Amino acid sequence: YHLGLREECIRRLGQASGMEVYEQLNRTFEHMSLAALVLGKLLALGPGILPTSLHRIDQLKKYKKPLYLPHSLHQRPSEKAERLNEQVLLELFTPSDLLPPELGCSSEREGDHVKAFCAAQKLNLVVASRQIPPSGFAYDPA
């Protein structure tokens, strides 16, 4: 769920100090931006890949800080709008191989979704932190 951050803090700093640092890091993450729109043409995503449940940039403006992340195994909200908001966060912060299949996430659709999202939002590019190719960088102009 936390991609090993807690365990790494404990390993390096011991149980008490490691948990304290881990909690402080999480409080810091709760106040960080989800994305940045650069010159209206480039969307930079801080936490991860472009969620398939994100259809418009303005959806990202609805999140208020501090941002509390849902857990993929917790009960889902009953209201449709709340479920969609939670889905976007889960996809942003949780690697797709750790998400339950019933959440409907698919990395197979990722390229097509990014191209459709860019066209609909009049963007040139989406930059995502979790997509790091072996060479360190790549650009797909298609």
Image (tube, helix red, strand yellow):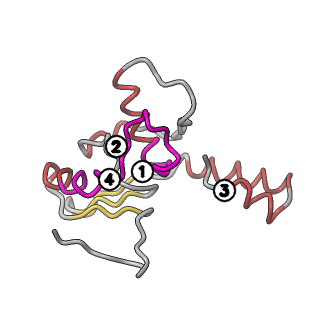
Q: Is residue 101 magenta?
A: yes
The type of residue carrying mark 4 is Glu
Where in the figure is residue 100, as x and y percent of width and height?
49, 38
Residue 108 - label: 4
Which callout, 2 or 4, points at the residue further toward the start of the chain?
Answer: 2
In this view, the residue in front, 24 or 70, is 70
What residue appears at the point 43 percent right and 33 percent down from the top-left corner?
Answer: 102
Which callout, 1 or 4, points at the residue further toward the start of the chain?
Answer: 1
Q: Which residue is mark 1?
A: 34
Q: Which residue is mark 2?
A: 60
Give the mark toward the camera: 2 or 4: 4
Marks 2 and 3, how far apart at CA: 26 Å
Marks 1 and 3, how far apart at CA: 21 Å
Marks 4 and 3, how far apart at CA: 25 Å
Question: How dense is the environment of label 1, judged by Cα within 10 Å: few (below 14), some, or many (20 and up)?
Answer: some
Q: Which residues are magenta?
A: 90-115
Give the mark toward the camera: 1 or 3: 3
CB of mark 1 within 8 Å of CB of mark 3? no
